[in-house]
Amino acid sequence: MTAPGMAGEPDEQTESRGRRFARWLYPRRRAQLWLLLAAPLLWIGLVYLGSLVILLLNAFWAKDAFTGKVAPFDWTLKAFADILTKPVYAIVAGRTVLIAVLVTITDALLAFPIAYYMARIASPRRRGALVVAVLLPLWAAYLVKTFAWRTILQGNGFLSWVLSPFGIPGPGLDELPNAWLVLSYLWLPYMILPIYAGLERIPDSLLEASADLGAKAGTTFRRVILPLAFPAVVAGSIFTFSLSLGDYIVPDLVADAKFIGNLIYDNSALGNLPVAAAYSLFPIVIMLVYLFVARRLGAFESL
């Protein structure tokens, strides 16, 4: 006979504890959820949010004039004073917000008819093909698409070759509208997909009821479809606006312009971390306000 506790036999005490814990856990769905999310929440809290908090704290820490290093817990508002007293920061912020707004409006105008055709008109087979076509550009690397547009827009590029017979000069790589054009192309799928999902959720019975009441197609679109799809448009605008607001590669490569991200990168590369951290608060505050407004408009239900 094998003595208790020898290898090959289960430990009865450990097994009974496990069974008791499983019995206690089984009816407690909330405890199961917390156990499931504990590891990822711990990772997000320590690694992501912790590093972000430390970064933003640098905005309030002084920089040693001799060594150039940041002195932790040496509190000062000098970085904010530098941003507020130098006009370049306000100019770049206004330029970035303007381009982000233009990109969002452009993508909304382009995405809505595409999404409407996909959701309400196209056959199931054609709808699947269009979804793949919308997602296809996302499979290509961001830098590959940006450099492709750089090749198109440069002085002796494809666009100059197309426009030269008409006596129109090419745009070159120092024009601000280039950033608007390329960013609109890059983030268009992020606008199409939420609008498509929002339009697909509109019941056909509402459109039939509108027609039965004598409303024409234009009236049905303005009073039924557009109000119901508007939260989905706002949901898509969260992606296009935030991604354009934080981009710093596209303006540098195709427009030779400075955006908020470029100034943050330049200051951090030069060792001026407090100013870079202080300027990082500007897009964060803008996006918090934007998300608050989007939530009030019901955009989160369309994500």
Image (spheres, rainbow, N blue to C red):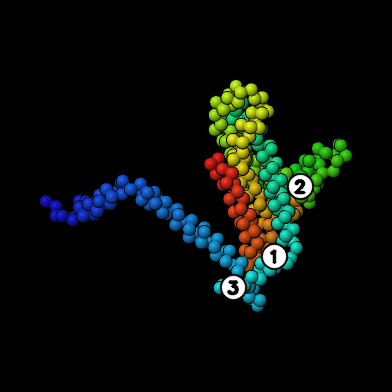
The answer, for residue 131, to whether it is visible in the render is: no
The answer, for residue 12, to whether it is visible in the render is: yes
Q: Position of residue 277 (x, y in %)?
A: 62, 63
Q: Residues within 10 Å of mark 3 (few under 14, many from 20)?
A: some
On the image, numbered disc 1 is attached to which residue? 83
Q: Residue at x 73, y 67 (%)?
A: 85
Of helix, strand and loop, which one carries label 3? strand
In this view, the residue farthest toward the right is 167
Q: Quadrant of the C terminus?
A: top right
How far is the residue under mark 2 from the one under mark 3? Answer: 41 Å
Q: Amino acid at mark 1?
A: Ile
Quarter of the image where one finds residue 162: top right
Quarter of the image where one finds residue 266: bottom right
Q: Residue at x 27, y 48 (%)?
A: 23
Disc nearest the viewer among 1 and 2: 1
Q: Residue at x 61, y 36 (%)?
A: 227
Answer with mark 1 or mark 2, whichever residue precedes in sequence: 1
Left or right for 277, reference 9 = right
> Of residues 2 and 192, which is closer to you in this image?
192
Tags 3 and 1 in contact by the CB under 8 Å rule? no
On the image, numbered disc 3 is attached to which residue? 75
Q: Amino acid at mark 3?
A: Trp
Answer with mark 3 or mark 1, whichever residue precedes in sequence: 3
From this view, report whether residue 221 is shown above or below residue 154. Answer: above
Tags 1 and 2 in contact by the CB under 8 Å rule? no
Q: Residues within 10 Å of mark 2 (few under 14, many from 20)?
A: some
